[in-house]
Image: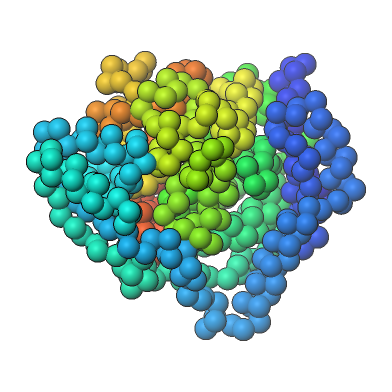
């Protein structure tokens, strides 16, 4: 069974989907021939999918995921985890981690070195900055900081060794479960980070839920699908569980034509190394599907892995990779920072050097990942207006609202702060975790070309945030932090959604 999707609004038909997901992952034969912008070709693509033509890569991934799952269940609980392979640490041999005290002028120097691609700023919160310095830059950074009278402390002398000793992440094999029904759906892993293959495996199961559609909005630089999960409003709730009461095609017509339809957009994984954002997004999806009473009149759209190439690369080559996998012309340095590539104040707070971690790209929207996200957000917004955009990142425990390029208040700043405080209050109740709510440029540093600024500046979405998840120390969050982080974000997000959807919208 193949599932397509069509966003209908009056006489306008918007084909958001190019790729479809099969109900049964073991017979997956999804194929994709173009980007989401190929709207006119959407029907051709669906036809192609019907023929069962499969991309070799996808077929191979699927086979691996399937056999892993089978192996895990065959061998029992004792062997359903394995040590994370450590070859993604090799690149970090000799890299050091320094803590630089926040003093007059040092932010400027760090920013200059960051823009030049000499170092990587890891920590954006608190009264100091934590930076990663590659071995070839140690003397240059030392010289510049000393010249400026800036003090620093070497926290880690060899990051690769440190990670091999400390980052014990258990990789659980994909024992995901069965097909979804209206009242239950397999859960994503919350005590282990999921590989790219496991995530796709999970999404295929999720796509069988009657309230869920999973579609590809385009392809990455290396040709991986960028998946969009659409959770439709529930028409009834049974014991807190979701229940679809109409066949899917009737349901779709009703919801897309609903004049009062509103939607929420969540993006995760735009920065490759921020694994916790992907895991939290999957947990939020699961909770929203399970607890249909939350946001009953709201369409929820989630892109759980916005930078799939980068995500894979962090597992296979370089754990600290941040950008996408673009091969930059005329440079030995790869990758574009996808959160500096959006066309709003492009280039103001970013780098034009391909070697920088915050390289903006040769032009705005030069990357297929940001193009796909932009087109999908435009299409969703035109059908059911986006009232909340939330981009999940790590780390720092900050809820940041736009703008990033200026400290001048963005439209609806007081309202964004109020709703942000609702998030922070509710996130803290169960876990005690404190999320500071602040303006992006004031609380972090100047930046531009990001998802949140674009949503505010171009889409004019009222409530827009970047959420920097746990913790305040490192990207390398232990897997036992996945569930509590997801839970506190769910508590906060649920309160936000409820604040945004009064009874009159709940029908
Ligand atoms: Zn990030």
Report the side of 441 relative to 146 (left or right): right
- Quadrant location of the C terminus? top right
Residue drawn at x 83%, y 39% is 46
Please provide percent x and percent y for residue 469. Answer: 36, 47
Q: Where is residue 462 in the image (x, y as percent from the top left)?
A: 43, 21
Could one spot residue 296 in this view of the protein?
A: no
Above or below for 367 versus 461: below
Q: How many labels does the image show?
A: 0
**Residue 467 placement: quadrant:** top left
Q: Nearer the viewer, residue 243 or 135?
A: 135
The part of the image, by quadrant, that contains residue 14 is: top right
Q: Which residue is drawn at 70% across and 28% down?
A: 37
**Residue 457 sits in which quadrant?**
top left
Can I make out residue 318 in this image?
yes
Who's the residue at 49% across and 18% down the image?
458
Indicate the position of residue 495 as horizontal and vertical percent values: 39, 38
Q: Nearer the viewer, residue 165 or 356?
A: 356
Q: In this view, does 478 lie to the left or right of 153?
A: right
Q: Residue furthest right?
A: 51
Residue toward you, 310 or 476: 310
Colour logic:
rainbow
Please state the horizontal and vertical placement of residue 195, each as a whole percent of the image: 56, 61
Residue at 43 percent across and 30 percent down: it is 352
């Amino acid at each position: 069974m193949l599932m397509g999707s069509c966003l209908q609004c009056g006489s306008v038909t918007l084909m958001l989907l190019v790729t479809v997901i099969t109900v049964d992952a073991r017979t997956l034969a999804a194929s994709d021939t173009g980007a989401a912008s190929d709207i006119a070709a959407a029907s051709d693509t669906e036809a192609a999918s019907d023929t069962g033509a499969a991309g070799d890569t996808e077929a191979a991934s699927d086979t691996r995921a399937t056999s892993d799952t089978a192996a895990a269940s065959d061998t029992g609980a004792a062997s359903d985890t394995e040590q994370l392979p450590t070859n993604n640490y090799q690149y970090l041999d000799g890299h050091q981690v320094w803590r630089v005290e926040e003093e007059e002028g040092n932010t400027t120097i760090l920013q200059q070195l960051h823009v030049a691609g000499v170092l990587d700023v890891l920590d954006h919160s608190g009264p100091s900055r934590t930076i990663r310095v590659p071995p070839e830059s140690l003397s240059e950074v030392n010289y510049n900081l000393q010249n400026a009278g800036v003090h620093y402390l070497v926290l880690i002398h060899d990051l690769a060794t440190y990670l091999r000793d400390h980052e014990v992440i258990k990789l659980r094999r994909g024992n995901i479960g069965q097909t979804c029904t209206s009242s239950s759906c397999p859960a994503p892993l919350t005590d282990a980070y999921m590989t790219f293959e496991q995530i796709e495996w999970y999404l295929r199961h999720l796509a069988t839920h009657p309230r869920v559609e999973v579609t590809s909005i385009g392809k990455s630089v290396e040709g991986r699908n960028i998946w969009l999960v659409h959770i439709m409003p529930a028409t009834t709730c049974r014991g807190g569980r979701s229940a679809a009461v109409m066949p899917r095609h009737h349901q779709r017509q009703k919801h897309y034509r609903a004049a009062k339809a509103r939607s929420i957009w969540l993006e995760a994984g735009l920065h490759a190394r921020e694994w916790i954002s992907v895991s939290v997004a999957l947990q939020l999806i699961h909770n929203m599907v399970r607890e249909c009473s939350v946001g009953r009149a709201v369409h929820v759209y989630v892109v759980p892995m916005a930078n799939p190439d980068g995500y894979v690369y962090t597992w296979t080559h370089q754990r600290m990779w941040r950008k996408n996998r673009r091969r930059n012309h005329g440079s030995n340095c790869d990758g574009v920072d996808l959160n500096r590539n959006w066309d709003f104040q492009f280039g103001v707070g970013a780098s034009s050097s391909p070697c920088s971690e915050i390289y903006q790209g040769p032009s705005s929207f030069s990357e297929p990942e940001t193009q796909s996200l932009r087109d999908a957000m435009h299409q969703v917004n035109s059908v059911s207006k986006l009232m909340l955009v939330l981009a999940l990142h790590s780390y720092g425990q900050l809820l940041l609202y736009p703008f990033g390029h200026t400290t001048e208040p963005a439209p609806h700043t007081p309202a964004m702060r109020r709703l942000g405080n609702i998030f922070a209050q509710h996130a803290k109740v169960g876990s005690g975790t404190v999320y500071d709510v602040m303006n992006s440029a004031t609380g972090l540093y100047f930046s531009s070309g990001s998802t949140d600024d674009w949503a505010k500046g171009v889409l004019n979405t009222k409530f827009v945030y970047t959420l920097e998840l746990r913790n305040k120390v490192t990207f390398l969050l232990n897997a036992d932090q996945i569930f509590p982080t997801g839970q506190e974000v769910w508590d906060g997000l649920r309160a936000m959604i409820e604040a945004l959807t009064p009874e009159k919208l709940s029908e």
